[in-house]
């Protein structure tokens, strides 16, 4: 029998990528989603059956934060993370042979806006506001489960960069249309991770059975927003990029139904624990990551 991995919320950009990578390694990958051809969230018995004897459960479930933070969307963002994590924990408890490892998404947004110093797992300061409240309760729900046979790891993920999904297409569009200058002051830090390293980190954690708890899941070299946009312009051979002042970003965010927090919050996050345990990043530098993603 093939080893089995269950990916909850595996229909998005990251989930599809991980599913393909694990399938290439010879795993049977099972997706939990709302779609009819997957194991569905409203079928608890099917979820338990999927989790039985699984090598790993990866939970990526959650409504995209790329939306306006009105009351309905805020409730959906919160519930789609907390409720699915709770549901998965209860299903793991029902298993006779539960997954050996449960990796749950979290977010680097849990830390405060930081332009003064980097945030690590040991010294980082938790922020305030809606997004932080979601992250704190997400982790609290996850770690509330005291699982004897299942190792638990929460990944405080920075912005994941890869081909054809996530933030790369919208940034490319801005650059292409000449609006690829700094956003706001440009001093805000951009913490990021190449999607290949996300897969590498998951494999690393799976192989190192002593690892559990919280991990900052980001490359070791965050950059300023000014540098991020300059690298995109250089690699796309666009000599000019008009800066986007805050007032224009706010107006644009309303038009495209998103929030300026996604680009203006300074996420200065360092993967202290991954480095301490010896993970070797395939793409430690943003320029190399973007060269790979933007080629072809």
Image: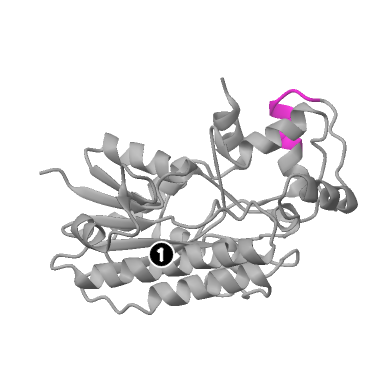
Residue 44, compared with residue 243, is above or below; it is below
Identified at 17% across, 47% down, the residue is 3
Q: Which residue ends up furthest to the left in the rendered image?
A: 1
The colour scheme of the drawn protein is one colour
Of 263 and 214, nearer the camera is: 263
Is residue 142 shown left or right of residue 119?
left
Mark 1, other Cα within 10 Å: few <14 / some 14–19 / many ≥20: many
- Residue 114 is left or right of residue 246, and the answer is left
Q: Is residue 231 magenta?
A: yes
Q: Is residue 111 visible?
A: no
Pick the residue in front: 176 or 8.
8
Q: Residue at x 72, y 31 (%)?
A: 173
Q: Secondary structure at mark 1?
A: helix
Rendered-image quadrant of the C terminus: top right
Residue drawn 73% across the image and 55% down it = 259
Q: Which residue is mark 1?
A: 84
Q: Nearer the viewer, residue 7 or 155?
A: 7
Kindly identify the residue that appears in the image at 66 percent across and 60 percent down: 268
Q: Position of residue 131 (x, y in %)?
A: 63, 67
Residue stretch in magenta: 230-238
User: Splitting the image into 4 quarters, where does residue 100 fall?
Assistant: bottom left
Does 3 sit left or right of 31 as displayed? left
Q: Is residue 67 magenta?
A: no
The residue positioned farthest toward the top in the image shown: 296
User: Residue 87 at what x, y percent from top left?
Assistant: 35, 68
Q: Position of residue 229 (x, y in %)?
A: 75, 39
**Residue 158 visible in image:** yes
Q: Measured from the top left, where is residue 254 in percent x and y?
A: 79, 51
Q: Main secondary structure of the magenta part?
A: helix
């Amino acid at each position: 029998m093939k080893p089995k991995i269950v990916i909850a919320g595996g229909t998005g950009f990251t989930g599809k990528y991980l599913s393909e990578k694990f399938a290439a390694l010879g795993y049977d990958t099972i997706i939990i989603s709302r779609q009819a051809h997957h194991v569905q969230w409203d079928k608890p018995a099917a979820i338990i059956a999927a989790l039985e004897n699984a090598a790993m459960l990866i939970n990526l479930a959650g409504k995209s934060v790329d939306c306006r933070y009105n009351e309905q969307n805020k409730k959906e963002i919160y519930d789609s993370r907390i409720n699915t994590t709770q549901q998965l924990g209860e299903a793991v408890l029902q298993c006779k042979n539960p997954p050996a490892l449960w990796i749950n998404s979290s977010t680097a947004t849990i830390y405060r806006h930081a332009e003064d110093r980097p945030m690590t797992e040991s010294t980082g300061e938790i922020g305030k506001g809606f997004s932080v409240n979601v992250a704190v309760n997400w982790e609290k729900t996850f770690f509330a489960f005291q699982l004897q046979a299942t190792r638990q790891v929460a990944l405080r993920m920075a912005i994941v960069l890869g081909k054809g999904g996530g933030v790369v297409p919208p940034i490319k569009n801005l650059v292409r249309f000449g609006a690829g200058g700094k956003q706001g002051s440009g001093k805000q830090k951009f913490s990021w991770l190449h999607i290949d390293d996300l897969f590498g980190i998951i494999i690393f954690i799976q192989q190192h059975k002593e690892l559990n708890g919280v991990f900052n899941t980001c490359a070791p070299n965050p950059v300023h927003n000014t540098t991020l946009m300059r690298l995109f312009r250089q690699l796309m051979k666009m000599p000019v990029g008009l800066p986007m002042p805050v007032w224009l970003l706010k107006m644009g965010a309303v038009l495209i139904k998103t929030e300026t927090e996604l680009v203006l919050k300074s996420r200065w996050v360092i993967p202290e624990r991954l480095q301490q345990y010896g993970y070797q990043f395939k793409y430690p530098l943003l320029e190399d990551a973007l060269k790979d993603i933007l080629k072809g």
